Amino acid sequence: MKNTIFKIEGLRCDGCASTVKALVEKEPGVKVATASFKDGEARILYDPETVTEDRLAAIIERPGYRVTARL
């Protein structure tokens, strides 16, 4: 398992963070996901053999948010 933090631009409220969390959690290979409007980030624990960071970033960006950093 691997843990990654995505810094996200465009989260305007807790509802936006909930949207990101829900989208990411649907992806096979994702064990746990949290998203924070206040911190402007998503923390994701995932299996790198099942899903890639690039795929996770694409999922986050699909509704119009922008991943600005991966930590």
Image (cartoon, helix red, strand yellow):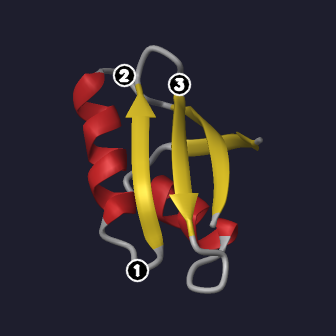
- Which residue extends farthest left? 15
Secondary element at tag 2: loop
**Quadrant of res 8:** top right
Judge by depth and name the residue closer to the eye, 36 or 58.
Answer: 36
Number of other residues with Cα within 10 Å of mark 1, as a class: few under 14, some 14 to 19, many 20 or more? few
Number of other residues with Cα within 10 Å of mark 3, as a class: few under 14, some 14 to 19, many 20 or more? some
The amino acid type, in three-letter code, at marker 3 is: Gly
Residue 16, labelled with which disc? none
Residue matched to label 3: 40
Quarter of the image that includes the N terminus: bottom right
Q: Relative to 28, is 66 on the left or the right? A: right
Tally the marks.
Answer: 3
The amino acid type, in three-letter code, at marker 2 is: Arg
Tell which tag, 2 or 3, sits nearer the viewer: 3
Real-space Cα separation, disc 2 to disc 1, in angstroms: 27 Å
Q: Position of residue 39 (x, y in %)?
A: 53, 18
Q: Position of residue 63 (x, y in %)?
A: 37, 53
- Find out whether the residues at labels 2 and 1 contact each other: C-beta distance under 8 Å: no
Q: Position of residue 19 (x, y in %)?
A: 27, 45
Residue matched to label 1: 28
Residue drawn at point x = 54 percent, y = 56 percent? 45
**Quadrant of res 28:** bottom left
- Which residue extends farthest bottom? 49
Judge by depth and name the residue closer to the eye, 32 or 38.
Answer: 32
Q: Position of residue 2 (x, y in %)?
A: 67, 61
Visible in this render: residue 62?
A: no
Residue matched to label 2: 12
